[in-house]
Amino acid sequence: MRPHVIESRQRWYRYIEQVLANPQDEAATRAAVTRMLTEPESLRTPEYQALWQQRGEQRKQMLGIIYRSASDEQRQHLLAELDEWIEDFNEMIARDI
């Protein structure tokens, strides 16, 4: 495993340890968990973040190629699946999970 990946994981572990060290502060815990989920890049090393972005671009290109090579029926199926995911997420948001 690459050193910047290991360092980024260690940053996450240290951050989690800090959050769990004071479980009585519910607001701080909620904010920390929100940060971990919505801003994961903030805990990555700069090298790992650059690699992450590069791979993200590669994933987008690959998915574009796959999508363009799919049949109309396959695209419709994919869109239906995505609509179901959207519904699930909207339900979770409505329940404030």
Image (cartoon, rainbow, N blue to C red):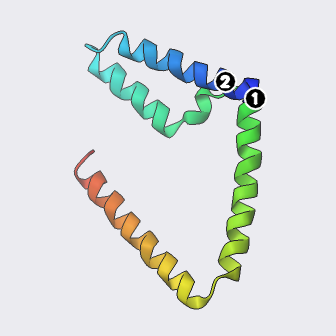
Residue at position x 48%, y 81% in the image? 77
Count of residue discs = 2
> Pointer 2: what residue?
6
Q: In this view, does 19 lie to the left or right of 66?
A: left
Residue type at mark 1: give it: Arg
Residue 39 sits in which quadrant? Answer: top right
Q: Residue furthest left?
A: 95
| Element at label 2 | helix
Q: In this picture, is 60 found above or below 20?
A: below
Place of residue 54 in the rendered image (x, y in percent of width and height, measured from the top left): 77, 47
Residue 49 sits in which quadrant? Answer: top right
Q: In this picture, is 92 found above or below 87?
A: above
Residue at position x 65%, y 76% in the image? 67
Residue type at mark 2: give it: Ile
Residue 88 - label: none
Place of residue 11 in the rendered image (x, y in percent of width and height, measured from the top left): 59, 20
Q: Mark 2 near mark 1, Cβ–Cβ under 8 Å?
A: yes
Q: In this view, does 53 lie to the left or right of 10?
A: right
Residue at position x 74%, y 49% in the image? 55
> Pointer 1: what residue?
2
Quadrant (top left, top right, bottom left, bottom right) of the N terminus: top right
Q: Is residue 65 left or right of residue 10?
A: right
Alpha-carbon span between mark 2 and mark 1: 6 Å
